Image: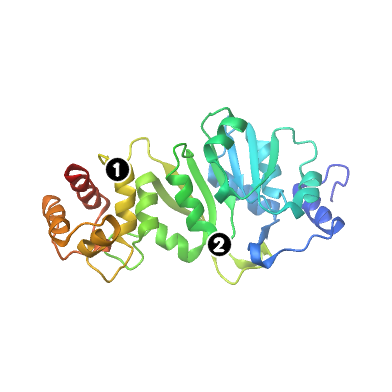
């Protein structure tokens, strides 16, 4: 029997969405998770503990936000759609450790947010994002000067396959290389379209990426390494030497000399290289500068 004197997060959200006549915006990719039982299981998998600060990106109707606030020390939810403000106010009523800021996370100063709301302490990320910004968000978090301890995020199944890919496969890409430099990834569970409101047209996966205590490679210059990763996959049908020329402005002779110094074939394509091999090329570039 439903307790209307102490409504669940899901009931709060459904009532608030109807009360404020909120309608999902297709252009923002709004596919909300409202099922409290499912969200509770996802948060179990995310490993959120009472001592954790949590950055939630895209709180939507706030069901996950409220459940996070019941588990974590402090929750900061970043939402781009101000139309959700009255909905989130209703759903998060009484949750003093949950705050919402309305801004575009891709334009946000991540360091400033973490310093202001978490006092510069470590934090974790939980997100149910519009799928069209998944890669951009993940790259921003992984490459930040204040990366999270973990990222638990709902992604399109195809994106999960890319994140989990290995060198030499079709899916191996800049996103996979960047994230595998940041941490260890695992697919926690698949989620069917019917779990969302409205349902997307694809299967989804909830994945978790735990930041390495020590990165698997240690490039001499991390900025050069990240730039090389982007260069390696910039034009997949071209050799890495050609991509080095295009990205770094090297001559053909210099590009070949760099690959030789790294022990790589001058005709190798970037997508064929492992993280360790990419690091050797990056270090060769740094030494030649």
- Using residue 33 as the reference point, say whether residue 181 is left or right of it: left
Q: Position of residue 129 (x, y in %)?
A: 59, 56
Picture coordinates of residue 26, whole percent (x, y): 67, 67
Dot 2, crowdedness within 10 Å: few (<14), some or many (≥20)? some
Task: Depth check: give the residue in front, 11 or 167.
Answer: 167
Q: Would residue 211 appear left or right of 242 to someone viewing this image? A: right
Q: CA distance from mark 2 to mark 1?
A: 28 Å
Q: Pick the quarter of the image with the C terminus.
A: top left
**Local secondary structure at mark 2:** helix
| Residue 18 quadrant | bottom right
Q: Position of residue 40 (x, y in %)?
A: 64, 47
Task: Please state which of residues 92 and 258 is positioned toward the viewer in this rendering.
Answer: 258
Q: Secondary structure at mark 1?
A: loop
| Residue under the image location 22 percent in, 66 percent down | 239
**Relative to the observer, which residue lies in front, 124 or 119?**
119
Tell which circle, 2 or 1, labels the residue nearer the N-terminal end. 2
Is residue 210 in view from this perspective?
Answer: yes
**Mark 1 neighbour class, 10 Å CA radius: few under 14, some 14 to 19, many 20 or more:** some
Nearer to us: label 2 or label 1: 2
Q: Is residue 108 above or below residue 35?
A: above
Residue 205 shows in the view: no
Q: How is the image coloured?
A: rainbow
Question: Could you tell me which residue is drawn at 15 percent across and 51 percent down?
Answer: 262
Q: Residue at x 51, y 32 (%)?
A: 122
Please name the residue that numbered disc 2 is placed on.
Answer: 131
**Residue 96's spot in the image, x, y percent?**
74, 32
Q: Which mark is residue 216?
A: 1
Quarter of the image for residue 97 reads top right
């Amino acid at each position: 029997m439903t307790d209307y004197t102490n409504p669940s997060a899901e009931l709060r959200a459904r009532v608030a969405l109807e009360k404020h006549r909120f309608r999902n915006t297709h252009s923002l990719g709004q596919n909300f998770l409202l099922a409290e039982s499912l969200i509770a299981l996802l948060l179990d998998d995310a490993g959120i503990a009472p001592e954790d600060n949590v950055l939630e990106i895209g709180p939507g109707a706030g069901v996950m936000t409220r459940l996070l606030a019941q588990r974590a020390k402090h929750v900061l939810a970043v939402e781009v759609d101000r139309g959700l403000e009255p909905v989130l106010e209703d759903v998060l009523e009484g949750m003093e450790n949950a705050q919402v800021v309305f801004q575009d996370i891709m334009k946000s100063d991540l360091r400033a947010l973490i310093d202001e709301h978490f006092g510069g302490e470590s934090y974790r990320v939980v997100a149910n994002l519009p799928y069209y910004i998944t890669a951009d968000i993940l790259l921003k978090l992984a490459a930040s000067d204040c990366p999270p301890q973990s990222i638990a995020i709902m992604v399109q199944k195809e994106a999960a396959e890319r994140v989990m890919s290995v060198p030499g496969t079709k899916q191996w890409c800049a996103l996979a290389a960047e994230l595998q430099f940041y941490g260890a990834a695992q697919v926690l569970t698949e989620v069917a379209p019917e779990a969302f409101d409205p349902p997307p047209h694809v299967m989804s996966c909830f994945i978790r990426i735990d930041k390495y205590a020590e990165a698997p490679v240690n490039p001499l210059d991390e900025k050069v390494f990240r730039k090389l990763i982007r260069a390696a996959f910039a034009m997949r049908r071209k050799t890495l030497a050609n991509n080095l020329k295009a990205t770094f402005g090297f001559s053909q002779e210099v590009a070949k000399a760099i690959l030789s110094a790294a022990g790589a074939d001058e005709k190798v394509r970037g997508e064929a290289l492992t993280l360790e091999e990419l690091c050797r090329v990056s270090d060769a570039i740094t030494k030649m500068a």
